[in-house]
Image (cartoon, rainbow, N blue to C red):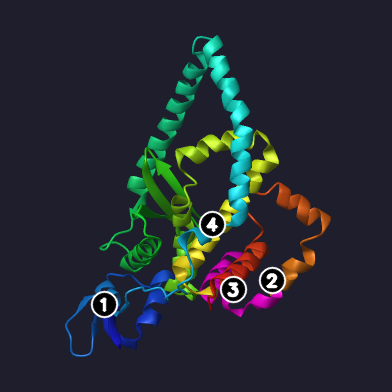
Amino acid sequence: MNIYLVQHGQETGPFTPEDLRHQIYSGELSRTTSARTDGTSWVPLESLLNAATPTVTPPPLPPQIAPEQLRDPKEKKALLWLYVFAVPVWLVLILWTALSFGIPLLVFGIVWLIHAMGQMWFAAHLKVNAVRVSDTQLPELNRAVDACCQRLGMERPDVYVLQHNVWNAFATKIFGRRMVVLFSGAVDSILLKGDQTQLMFVVGHELGHHWAGHLNLSQKLAKMGGWVFWLGLWHSRRAELTCDRVGLFCAGSAKASQLAMMNLTVGAQLANRVNLEAAVQQWQGHRREFFVKYRTLYSTHPHLLARLEHLTLAAQEFGMG
């Protein structure tokens, strides 16, 4: 498709949809710029780009992949140990409540109220400072969200894009309402040099927290076992690997998922140039060093090159190219 624009009062072009998307994501061009194709009338550029954007359909997966295979096997073990160490904490709290005529309940009530106020404050911030993704708002991103939710067989949470120039995103749950917040730094970075499939890995990773129940009450109760500090961190790292596997499942492509991980590691400009095999070998060459192991023990997330290796192994396990 050839697209022509009106810029500074003059017709320019032709441009391809890919060229124009890059200009939009880099801030050089507005979505509302007047545009047309050969033999058509002038319309907002966004409407032409939406028509030129194919429906996001993940590649088919090998039939032997069961949804429960997406969970990292060691996450189950870490969660079990959290429950084990949470039991004495809850027994002490129950005994304390009984002997003190409910004083701990009052303390919990105050803590819950403070937490609830913080959640309402954050929700209010999102409603007026972020954009909620829908079929009429950021439709290309909306298609990626819908495709991931359909593949996972889960109800769609609210998805917001918030301006923050860092490569990050997170899942949250506010009064039972599930949300995913994508920072603009991550979305822009992938859309500038990557593709929709890479974006589906990022979206799928955050949806993975909801799919795996990481924000459910049962797992929040288990986190009382986090008084064993390293155990809580271990579970956090394994949960992130579960979400990477879910992101891989949503994207349906090992290469796209690995490139999305490299985008996080070296940035949009260099991600496509990274030798993925050499990057995995770099991790394998340093993984047993003392200070690397020490840093791992105190990390909530696995190291990026370790995540790349796990993605590669998961893709092999799933029989995915």
Q: Which residue is mark 2?
A: 280
**Residue 240 included in the magenta stretch of the image:** no
The tag on residue 316 is 3
Q: Residues within 10 Å of mark 1 (few under 14, many from 20)?
A: few
Name the element at disc 1: helix
What range of the chain is rendered magenta?
Answer: 255-278
Identify the amino acid type marked 3: Gln
Q: How many marks?
A: 4
User: CA–CA distance between discs 2 and 4?
Assistant: 22 Å
User: CA–CA distance between discs 2 and 3?
Assistant: 14 Å
Name the element at disc 4: loop
Residue 297, how many percent across, how many down? 72, 48
Q: Quadrant of residue 135?
A: bottom left
Q: Residues within 10 Å of mark 2 (few under 14, many from 20)?
A: some
Q: Nearer the viewer, residue 242 or 269?
A: 242
Residue 266 appears in the rendering: no
Q: Which residue is mark 1?
A: 51
Identify the amino acid type marked 1: Ala
Mark 4 or 1: in front is 4
Disc 1 + disc 2, Cβ < 8 Å: no
**Residue 258 included in the magenta stretch of the image:** yes
The tag on residue 71 is 4
Identify the amino acid type marked 2: Val
Residue 54 appears in the rendering: yes
The residue sitting at 38% across, 36% down in the picture is 120
Residue 171, how many percent across, how many down? 46, 50
User: CA–CA distance between discs 1 and 2?
Assistant: 39 Å
